[in-house]
Structure formats: structure tokens, C-alpha cells
Amino acid sequence: MNRRKPHPRWGFLTPLYLLGVALHRHIYEWKIIVPFLPSQPTLTLGNLHAGGTGKTPIALWILEQIQPQVSDVAYVARGYGRKTKETRRVELQDTAEEVGDEPRLVRSVFGHSPDVHVIVAHKRRDAFQMLPKNCPVILDDAMQHWDLKSPITLLICPYGEWYTEAAVLPAGPLRESPEAAGRASAVVISKCPHPLDAHERLAIATKLGLRKDQPLFAAQEVMGEPFPRWNAPAWRGDETALVFSGIGDPRRFESFATAPERFDQGGVAAVTLRFPDHSPLDETRCAQIAADAYQSGCNALLTTGKDLARLPQKPEAWAHLNVYVLPHEADFGVDRNPFLLWLQNQWKAHGYRVPLQL
């Protein structure tokens, strides 16, 4: 899926784009169409940037914190890029074409756990009919989904990519103007390269123009050692690897994947390939990756979990290549307990009782 990249020369179209956004929003604000208010305790994850903010690792982290403490928890998403349209539960055997890569990744992380519900729905309101009454719901990428009115919205902003310093589409990467951040209940700074001290937190909150009732949390990006897939041997560090990804912002992944310490036994990242976000790994694309790998003398492929979620099985073209995933997680660190306490209190203020162990 090739999109025209944002560019300042398209700035003259931004007012038209914002007009379209406003008209769409007013259809629901003026209740021409009445937004759906969930009966379940719901947390909306959203962003102003058009992708690449690190929402999926944060969604997984929140689910992992909540799951052991409740009888049911749910992840609801549109299922971007899927070729199906119906509202459906995501099962382990489903493909990315059927449910989207991110829901398939979430399902694979939790396996067959019956207490974790993963549902894709074009109209998110339809998913709630399939969930238990008191089931906490993580609603992914729905800050601009006006058809549903969630009481709590968590705005995710990547470290160093401040929305107050960016332009709106098509001139820049923002879906809405920076003032839209006022709808957020709290802000998470994702992809932090280091823990944030009090001074830096205050500086960021000031830069983003946060109100006193909008707390700021920070999440670092953690990547582990390459994990073998499809019977590949354990990673040794002497591999000659082709690194590839099709994610919103591949820069930090590539930095981790090609770091010298990853190849400390004489290996090397010989080739790095980038594809568009959510780009399908079809037979042609897989053959291209294999051809580039063999031509460069590579014996291994290194990619993200989100990319590999698009493949139900190892492609034939990769038969003689070892495949590895670089684990990619969010870590709230010292913000874990303050965040869970904030979330518990937010739900309680809206009439939901979801006791969370701090």
C-alpha cells in the first residue's frame, strides 16, 4: 500500500483536509448520528500522528498488566488492511488478511487464553455486543473514531516527535491539529530512549501544553535478543542477516537490529529493506526478500513480530534462510504503578470497578 508521504508543498490542501475532519466530527457532536457509549470499562488508545507512535507495544503492555487481575479483558481494533469486513473474534489460525496484522499479533501473544478477547470491527460499537458486561476493553487507534464515545482516552506521542511542532496532513504527519490533544485524559510519551526525570517531564508537559488534569506517563522501548522462528537455531551473533520491516516508523527497530552488539561473533547486517506500514508479505514480496538475501550472501532474516504476524507459515522462498524476530516491548518502568492507579481511578470515576494490583 503506497501512500503519498506528507510534504510541506501540500500545505495548501491542509485547510480542506481539516474542514473534512471537522464536518465528520460534527456529524457525531451534533448527534446527527448518536455516538455509542460502551457499558464496559473502556480505554481508548490514540494518536495525532498518522502511525508509527508505538501503540501496539503499549496496548500489549496494558493488557498484560490487567489480564492476571480480571476474569476477562478485551482488545478491540479495526483490523487495518484486512480483506474481510465482518465483526469477528480473532483466533490463532486466522491470517493477517482475515483480521489484520496487529490483532493477529495480539492474539498470538496471548495464545488460546479464553479470558483475553481479541475482536476486529469496522464499527467498533459492534464489538461490544460480543463481550461480557464488566470486561475491561482496550480500544486501539480510536481517538478519531467518532462513532464511539469512550470516557477515557490515552494519547500516545513518540519521544522527540512533538505534535506541537508538526504540521497537519498532507503537509505533515498529524491527523488533527495539535489542539485536539485537549480531548486526551492523559498522555504517554512512547519510545523514550531513557527514563525521564522530573525536570524533563515538566519540560515535555510544557512543550505539549498539557493541562494540570492531564498526567504525563513515559514508556521506554525495549528490544530483546532475536527469537528463532520455524525451527531456526538459537541466535549466535555470527549470522549474515537481511533486516526488513513494514511498520510505521522503522528507525528504532533498524537501529536495534543492526547494532554491532547484535553481531558480536563476527556476523553482520548486510541488507536493510523497508516496506510501507501494514504492507502484505505476499508471495512476490517474500520472493523479493529471499532474492536480495541470497544475492547478498545472507543466511538469516531479522524482522518484527508485527511483520511476521502477516505470515501463517514459513514461505517456500525462505526455505534455506533462518528467520528471527526481534522482540519489541514497551516498559513503563517507575510509571507502572502510577499509571495503573490513574487508570483504576479513572474507571472508578465513571462508575466502573476494576481493582488493579499495584
Image (cartoon, rainbow, N blue to C red):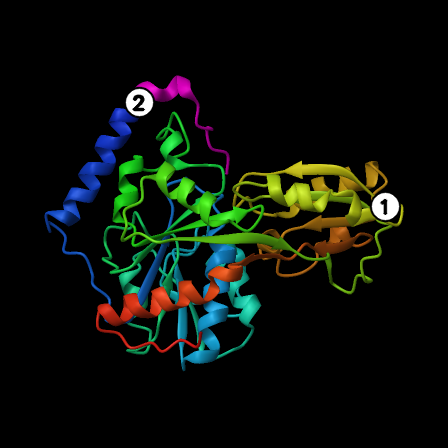
Side of 247 relative to 173 (left or right): right
- Is residue 207 placed above or below 103 in the rendered structure? above
The Cα atoms of the two marked residues, 1 and 2, are separated by: 48 Å
Q: Position of residue 266 (x, y in %)?
A: 89, 45
Q: Which mark is residue 13?
A: 2
Identify the magenta region: 1-13
Q: Quadrant of the C terminus?
A: bottom left
Residue at x-position 82% and y-position 36%: 295
Give whichever of 186, 155 is nearer the camera. Answer: 186
Q: Position of residue 299 (x, y in %)?
A: 83, 48
Residue 165 can be seen, yes or no: yes
Q: Which mark is residue 50?
A: none
The three-letter amino acid code for the residue at tag 1 is: Gly
Q: Quadrant of residue 140?
A: bottom left
Name the residue beneath numbered marker 1: 267
- Is residue 255 placed above or below 123 in the rendered structure? above
Give whichever of 18, 97 is nearer the camera. Answer: 18
Give whichever of 252, 75 is nearer the camera. Answer: 252
Q: Is residue 233 magenta?
A: no
The three-letter amino acid code for the residue at tag 2 is: Leu
Q: In the rendered structure, which disc, 1 or 2, sits on the residue that comes first in sequence? A: 2
Mark 2: few/some/many CA within 10 Å (<14, 14-19, 20+): few
Q: Quadrant of residue 71?
A: bottom left
